[in-house]
């Protein structure tokens, strides 16, 4: 682990989008194309601590697209303070009307602050 110029602790994790292989997992351009998330390194730098992305279930992909919530890393920064399951998506991170889109209430994370206005604590 290391700290960036803003003092935020960062760490390297295996790229979820390409599963650490460094190649485009879907072969859209070519089977030889580098992964668009890790640029062929097989690892990505993320903020620590982190939790699995609820929107893509940690895969880094929604269908053949890079997950817009975690940007393909498969993880998101861990929430600070007490949280509760998002009342709109029930923790899936998906928008009910369009599952490929992330929930607008929790921004695809599946959890919201327990102190948020109108949210019941569990």
Image (tube, rainbow, N blue to C red):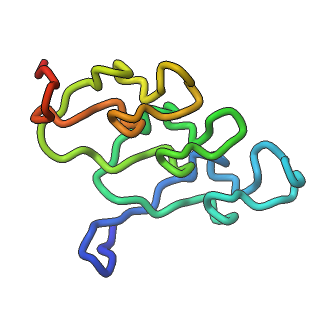
Image spot of residue 39 (x, y percent): 67, 65
Q: At x 57% / y 52%, what residue is drawn? A: 15
Q: Is residue 32 above or below residue 101?
A: below
Image spot of residue 47 (x, y percent): 35, 59
Q: At x 50% / y 37%, what residue is drawn? A: 58
Q: Nearer the viewer, residue 97 or 75?
A: 97
Asked if residue 24 lies left or right of residue 104, the reply is: right
> What quarter of the picture does the N terminus occupy?
bottom left
- Residue at the extreme right: 30
Image spot of residue 83 (x, y percent): 18, 33
Asked if residue 65 lies left or right of residue 100, the reply is: right
- Residue at the extreme bottom: 5
Q: Nearer the viewer, residue 107 or 41?
A: 107
Indicate the quadrant where residue 34 lies.
bottom right
Q: At x 43% / y 38%, what residue is drawn? A: 53
Asked if residue 72 lies left or right of residue 5, the reply is: right
Image spot of residue 55 (x, y percent): 48, 33
């Amino acid at each position: 682990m290391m700290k960036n110029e803003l003092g935020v602790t960062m760490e390297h994790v295996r790229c979820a989008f390409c599963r650490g292989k460094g190649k485009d997992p879907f072969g859209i351009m070519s089977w030889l194309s580098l992964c668009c998330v890790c640029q062929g390194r097989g690892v990505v730098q993320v903020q620590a601590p982190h939790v699995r992305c609820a929107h893509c279930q940690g895969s880094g992909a929604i269908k053949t697209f890079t997950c817009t919530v975690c940007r393909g890393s498969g993880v998101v920064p861990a929430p600070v303070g007490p949280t509760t399951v998002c009342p709109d998506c029930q923790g899936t991170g998906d928008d009910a009307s369009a599952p490929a889109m992330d929930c607008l209430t929790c921004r695809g994370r599946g959890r919201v602050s327990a102190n948020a206005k109108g949210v019941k604590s569990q």
